[in-house]
Amino acid sequence: LSFSQYAKAEDTDYVTCGSAIKLQHTEAGNKYFLHSNGARVNSRGSSGQVLITASPDSNKMSALWLVGEGHGQPPCKVGSKIAYGTKIRLSHVETTCNLHSHTMRSPLSGQQEVTGFGEKGEGDKGDDWLVQPKRNSKEHYWRIGDEVFLRHAETNMYLGSSEQAKFTQRNCGHNCPVMNHLEVFGRGNADSFCYWKTTTGVYLYK
């Protein structure tokens, strides 16, 4: 879904500032979406911040993320295309927290923890991510439907997920709020566990 009065057809192929997007994890066959329901990370040694997962349910508002400028950056112009290498912030539409990472360990795989942090778009530099294309891409801007990497600006870890790290009754309990979701983590290698793409969303254009 897109909204524009004047945008050229070719411009509507791209992710833009101010758009609300759903990010699919492609390593798992496009079946999981970056998600939060506001639950907290409660494993031993964790931050206690908002839990971020990859959810098999694509139909909920809990999979929508607002694309904005990086922490402390001048406001981006609504409808402007996101160039590769741009420092962005992804704010969760329902909880208003930002996609965040830091050097604590993730609860299932022991990789770098990824959480939701801050409120109403306010946070810190741990909320900054760099959009990067797959190798050999000729694109200069983030095109809808293309696989990309999201690299955490502060720690250089890549946003990742895997069906090998799934929340189950065994590791999350009988009343697990994220049953059958995948853990989302920061990963040192830009590999197939770190491929994401966006197709569904509300896209804004100049």
Image: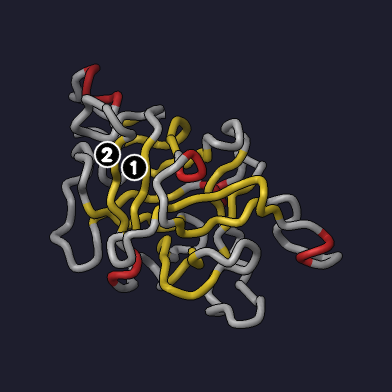
In percent of width and height, residue 192 lies at 48, 39
Using the rendered image of the protein, determine whether residue 115 is visible from the camera's viewpoint: no
Residue extending farthest to the bottom is 45
Relative to residue 41, is residue 9 drawn left or right? left
Q: Quadrant of residue 102?
A: bottom left
Residue name at image x 46 percent, y 59 percent: 186
Q: Quadrant of residue 59?
A: top right
Residue name at image x 42 percent, y 67 percent: 101
Using the rendered image of the protein, determine whether residue 171 is visible from the camera's viewpoint: yes
In percent of width and height, residue 77 lies at 16, 47
Relative to residue 60, is residue 94 drawn left or right? left
Residue extending farthest to the right is 174
Give the crowd class for mark 2: few <14, some 14-19, many >=20 residues within 10 Å: many
Residue name at image x 28 percent, y 61 percent: 153
Give the crowd class for mark 1: few <14, some 14-19, many >=20 residues within 10 Å: many
Q: Say which of 56 and 113 sits in front.
A: 113
The circle on residue 16 is 2
